[in-house]
Image (tube, rainbow, N blue to C red):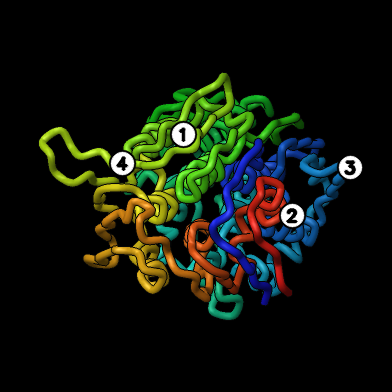
């Protein structure tokens, strides 16, 4: 198990480029199964979750070319269906949360798919009901295979058929999976209460360039005109910058009282994220597609208009993504004022705050979903600590805390951070951070 060793208290300076969006990458890489033709993806993040998904595709027989960093070409013209039905495939899929996104394309193209209970972050229950109910609405049948420990999905002999569905929750991966399954169905599929995050919009744009007609991009009401069994065409697609990385770097600049510029952020796709950090008192500036965060002596948390404590909560797009609440929480520990952080979606995502409390942060964990942060205004620096990363977002939040703390901290189990952040230690050293990796 690898460990980060971080000496806190160093100022950052310079420019940093966000990687390609992890969540979008997992969706569009899965979509390459919908065609026999070549698909070229650019700005692909070189992170563990992406590499594991690509290895899974290689096992299925997908031809993968990787000429330079960030560019991949895929050709899925000869899929090994025996492997796709094997216990080995299920075992590999169960280790990777993103593997759920293969079910929709496999069902659309081959009429059958194994759906393993996915792994990934240890942040509480992450149900797959939305995915499965969507497949069933398209006419698929399902049973559980005790031997392979997986759900077996089967399309009817005539193929999937478009239908109307109202999703029980605006699940991002659930929406993406259903969209991909519907691309080759007969007729029109209407999805109401669809997730409309930029990742889903980007997937739809890619599928449109592959020959599918999709109406309602950017809204929660989508209509997918299925091809009636015809496979899609090849295309070239560029992945957006990762908005979670952008938010992480904003918080990183503030907690270390540093001045940095985040380059090429696709600012118009960031939604409410910049304004959410501004409410913590961070005076960020938009400069074209870049974000400049100036060094400040003090970051003062806003109060609500009636004078009550600021309440920051996650919600479906265009609300605040839950993936940034951990970063906002740790950033607030060194701002001035108080804030209630409300993580609605996952019941275990705030448990990492015990590590921050050990570092001297003033945090009251109200319940598994809510924490009140009382900012120390940099008057009392955090203390160094030894920690283990339970998931990607908690890991990056711990890294921010360690960069602000007095002394040398150690963060173990950093493969969790590597799952979502590309060469984060090397990129932060280029900004002036004192961080190195110990294997």
Question: Is residue 134 shown to the viewer in this render?
Answer: no
- Rendered location of residue 168, percent (x, y): 32, 48
Res 348 quadrant in image? bottom left
Q: Which residue is mark 3?
A: 67
C-alpha separation, residue under disc 3 versus residue under disc 1: 37 Å
Quadrant of the image for the C terminus? bottom right
C-alpha separation, residue under disc 1 versus residue under disc 2: 29 Å
Q: Which residue is mark 2?
A: 54
- Rendered location of residue 313, percent (x, y): 29, 47
Q: Mark 1 or 2, which is nearer the eye?
A: 2
At mark 1, the secondary structure is strand
Res 231 quadrant in image? top right
Q: Earlier in the sequence, mark 2 or mark 3?
A: 2
- Rendered location of residue 315, percent (x, y): 33, 44
Question: Is residue 237 shown to the viewer in this render?
Answer: yes
Q: Mark 3 or 1, which is nearer the eye?
A: 3
Q: Earlier in the sequence, mark 4 or mark 3?
A: 3
Mark 1 residue crowding within 10 angstroms, few (<14) / some (14–19) / many (20+)? many
On residue 300, the disc is 4
On residue 189, the disc is 1
């Amino acid at each position: 198990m690898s460990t980060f060793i971080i000496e806190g208290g160093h100022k950052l300076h310079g420019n940093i480029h966000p990687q390609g969006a992890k969540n979008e990458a997992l969706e569009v890489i899965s979509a390459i199964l919908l065609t026999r033709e070549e698909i070229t993806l650019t700005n692909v993040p070189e992170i563990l979750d992406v590499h594991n998904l690509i290895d899974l595709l290689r096992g299925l027989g997908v031809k993968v070319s990787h000429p330079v960093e960030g560019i991949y070409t895929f050709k899925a013209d000869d899929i090994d269906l025996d492997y796709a039905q094997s216990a080995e495939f299920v075992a590999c899929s169960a280790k990777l949360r993103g593997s759920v996104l293969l079910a929709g394309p496999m069902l659309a193209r081959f009429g059958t798919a194994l759906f393993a209970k996915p792994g990934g972050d240890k942040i509480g229950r992450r149900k797959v009901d939305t995915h499965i109910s969507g497949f069933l609405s398209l006419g698929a049948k399902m049973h559980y295979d005790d031997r392979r420990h997986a759900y077996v999905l089967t399309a009817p002999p005539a193929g999937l058929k478009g239908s109307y569905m109202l999703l029980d929750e605006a699940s991002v991966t659930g929406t993406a999976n259903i969209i991909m399954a519907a691309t080759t169905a007969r007729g029109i599929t209407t999805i109401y209460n669809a997730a409309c995050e930029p990742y889903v919009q980007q997937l739809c744009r890619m599928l449109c360039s592959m020959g599918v007609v999709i109406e309602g991009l950017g809204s929660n009401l989508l209509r997918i005109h299925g091809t009636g069994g015809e496979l899609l065409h090849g295309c070239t697609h560029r992945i957006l910058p990762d908005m979670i990385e952008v938010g992480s770097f904003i918080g990183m600049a503030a907690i270390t009282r540093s001045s940095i510029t985040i380059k090429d952020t696709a600012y118009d796709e960031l939604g409410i994220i910049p304004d959410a950090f501004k409410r913590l008192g961070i005076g960020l500036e938009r400069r074209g597609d870049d974000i400049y965060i100036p060094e400040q002596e003090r970051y003062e948390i806003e109060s609500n208009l009636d004078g009550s404590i600021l309440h920051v909560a996650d919600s479906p797009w265009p609300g605040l993504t839950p993936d940034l609440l951990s970063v906002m929480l740790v950033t607030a520990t060194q701002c001035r004022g108080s804030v209630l952080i409300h993580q609605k979606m996952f019941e275990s995502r705030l448990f990492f705050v015990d590590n921050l409390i050990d570092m001297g942060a003033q945090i009251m964990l109200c319940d598994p979903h809510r924490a009140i942060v009382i900012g120390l205004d940099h008057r009392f620096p955090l203390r160094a600590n030894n920690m283990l990363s339970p998931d990607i977002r908690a890991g990056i939040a711990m890294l921010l805390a360690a960069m602000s703390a007095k002394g040398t901290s150690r963060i173990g189990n950093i493969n969790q951070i590597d799952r979502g952040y590309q060469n984060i230690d090397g990129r932060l050293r280029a900004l002036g951070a004192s961080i190195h990796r110990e294997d």
